[in-house]
Structures are given as C-alpha cells and as structure tokens.
Amino acid sequence: MQFDKLIDNFDKEHLLHPYTSPLMPLPALKVTSATGCCLVLSDGTALIDGTSSWWCALHGYNVPELNAALAAQLSRMAHVMFGGLTHEAAVALGKTLLGMVPKGLQRIFFVDSGSVAVEAALKMVLQYQLAQGSSEKCEIASIAGGYHGDTWNAMSVCDPVAGMHRLFKPLLPIRYFAPAPRCSFDDPWDEQDFAPMQELLQRRRHSLAAVIVEPVLQGAGGMRFYHPQYLRCLSEQCRTYGIKLIVDEIATGFGRIGRLFACEYAGICPDIMCIGKGLSGGYLPLAAVVTSEEIAQVLGHYAPQALMHGPTFMANPLACAVSNASCRLLLASPWQERVSHIEAQLKSLLYPLCSVPQVAHVRVLGAVGVVETYRPVKMREAMERLVSMGVWIRPLGRLLYVMPPFVISSAQLQQLCEAIAVVVQDPELFA
Ligand SMILES: *Cc1c(COP(=O)(O)O)cnc(C)c1O
C-alpha cells in the first residue's frame, strides 16, 4: 500500500484536522466507506477499527437498524427548532434514557457536543447556587489528569499542567484541582487516596459550586482507571458540603467499561451527568446534560427561571431518532457479554506486553485496552506501520490504546492486539 496515494491534496492544503499542524499535518487517510468494524480506504484497503471513532461507534459502522431509523426520521423531518416545539424523536429518546441513567436523574437537556454539555452543566450549577442565594459558591473543582472537552470552560477543567490546553491557561477561569487518584481500579482501596480532595472540599466548602470528574476512567487526559471508592467518597462529601457533583460520562457511558454508566461501579447518583459520544452510536453529533428534579426545581423557581442556554440544533430530530435506535439496539444486545469477552481477550493478549522493555504499564477495563510506553510514539511512523498491518489505532503520546466497537470479532480484536505488540517491540517507532 502506498501511503501517499491515500491522501487528498485538497484536504491537505485546505482542511484543518484536529490537533495537527496546518503545514506538516499528520497524514489524513481518505475513507470511502465503513461497515461493521472496518474502514475502507480509497485504495480499497480495509482497516480494522480500534477506536470506535473516538468512543462513538458502539455497534460499528453502517448498522442496518440505525440506517433505518435515520431514513424513517428523514422522511418525516430533518430538523425543527426546539424552542417552543417538540417532536416524537426527542420524547422517545428521553424515555429511553431515563430507563438507563441512575434513578435520581429526571431532567434532560440536549445539546450537540460533549464540550457543550460540559459548558451547560457548569452554567447549570452556577445558576443553581445563585438561585439558592449562595452567590459565593461560584468556583469549580476537579482532579488533575482529566479531559472534559475543548471549549473555554471545558478546557478550564482539563488537566492544567499536562493537558492539551495548557497554552491557554493564563486566559482561563481559575479552577481548583486535587491530584489525580492514585489507587487504581483493582488495587485495594487506600483511604489516603481521597485525602487531598477531602482537604480541598473542606477548605473551599464556602466557595465551591461543584466538582466535575470523569468517573472511574480518565480518558484523553491519560487513560487511567481509578478506584470506584474514590467516587463514593466524593459523592458523600459533596453532599455534606452542599457542593454539586457533575460526572462526565461522555467517554465512559453506554457500556464502554462494563457498566451502562461508570458511576454504577460506585453505586452513586450524581447531581448532573454529561453524556455524548456513544449516545448516537457514532451517527450524528448529540450530547446531553441529565440532572435531578431538585436542580430543575431550584432553577425554575428563581430568576431568570430558566437555564440560559439553547443551541440552534438542540435535540435535532435526526440525531435523536438515531440515538434512540442506538440505545435500544444496545439494550437489546448481549452487550455485557460482549464487553466482558473483549475485556478477557484484551487482558490475555496485552498483559504479556508488560515484559517488553519499552512498555511501562498495561491496563484493561471493559472494552478499553491501554499500553503505556516510556517514550512517546513517533506518530507518523507508528501510524504508517499500524495501517500497513491493516488496523486503525491512533496513538496518543505515550499511549497505544484500543476501544473497539462492541461487535468486534475475536479474530479482529486479535489483529488489533498483535499490531500493538509489533509497534511496542520496535524501538525505532519511539522518540
Ligand atoms: C470527548 C470528551 C468530551 C468532549 O466531547 P466533544 O463531543 O468532543 O465536545 C468531554 N468529556 C469527555 C470525558 C470526553 O471524552
């Protein structure tokens, strides 16, 4: 396969891609179709997808049930504004979602991306505290090593030091960070792990409006799994101090790490949950803020008596229809079995890589497998090697990781893992 032939010159000269140079961009391979767990490139090469297109494509690509739901909705209407109007697609999706999220969450605010869900959630807690007469409660805390999106306030709660947004730090609102949890998912719980957050909450109890965290799995900020007891402590202490808890389930939601939502591992119900990514099964941009009746009541009773937010494409009917079909397909599928099967296979094929000199750590939870190396991967060279082996995996610094569609076959998953093994055993592919 010739890598250069897969690149579109117009694209290279005029279209900007995420997190890459406008002048010397990483190659963007041209995809002509995608079906099942395979992406088909312009020269006919099929790549097994290890990314689910950034956590989204739970059921793979070109899924008949989702295509049908989208076509049916399209034949009725593509879009109407959500201000003053509603439609069956939003109502049906709302009903489905309420059957999935923790019982205490009753109110849903649809938006068009995960970052915007985080923005709306932060506005919601600030308005809530104001409405309560607690105007001094206007600060936000989080934990280091997190990732919550790329818009302004979402950036402000991402990891402040190693995160991809440190460039903007001087311009971002000040947030308060506890160190990232150290106790990992399978470790015995260590009380000390929560101590720094406990101290932060106690010290800033009069000024904190909310804490926002990714539950159990910190994704793009480092792909680390932490102990659910941390969340349990956080939930209890937030309640004690009247601080709202926002869990960002945008990456972890919809079964990815073995529970429908990661906060189920801790048995907690947050005040606000942000969902996105897997919500639409990877078809259309849709995300949501799901919150409690209590927050809705407080927002509704005090001026301005409304959440001051309303995206143009809020609750887009096409996105809602396909998301509802995706959620229903997920619930009707043996997803727990599939995810635990993927987990077992990832463990058996990736854990042995611990003994490779280049490898610092290997971790697996649910349908997420991570190989952390000591040195950063040379992106261009590693990508070229991975593609030549017929897989689509996108390394991130010192991380090679996969989160495949749940419908991946054992043979396909094996090919993904073998490709990772080849990369980590080649010192030439590391800086
Ligand atoms: C991807 C992600 C976001 C941002 O979602 P976008 O749809 O890219 O704006 C926020 N939080 C987490 C945990 C994510 O993984």
Image: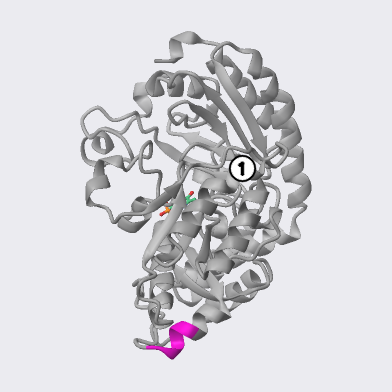
Q: Quadrant of residue 238?
A: bottom right
Q: Position of residue 5 (x, y in %)?
A: 36, 25
Main secondary structure type of the part rendered in magenta: helix
Residue, x 68% and y 26% (percent of image)? 414
Residue, x 59% and y 63% (percent of image)? 68
SS label for mark 1: helix
Tag 1: amino acid: Gln
- Which range is magenta? 298-302
Q: Is residue 250 above or below residue 76?
A: above
Which residue was labeled with disc 1?
192
Q: Is residue 274 above or below residue 106?
A: above
Horizontally, is 191 left or right of 310 in the view? right
Q: Nearer the viewer, residue 388 or 149?
A: 149
Can residue 418 be found in the magenta stretch? no
Q: Nearer the viewer, residue 102 or 80?
A: 102
Is residue 133 something that shows in the picture?
A: yes
Q: Nearer the viewer, residue 196 or 55?
A: 196
**Count of numbered tags:** 1
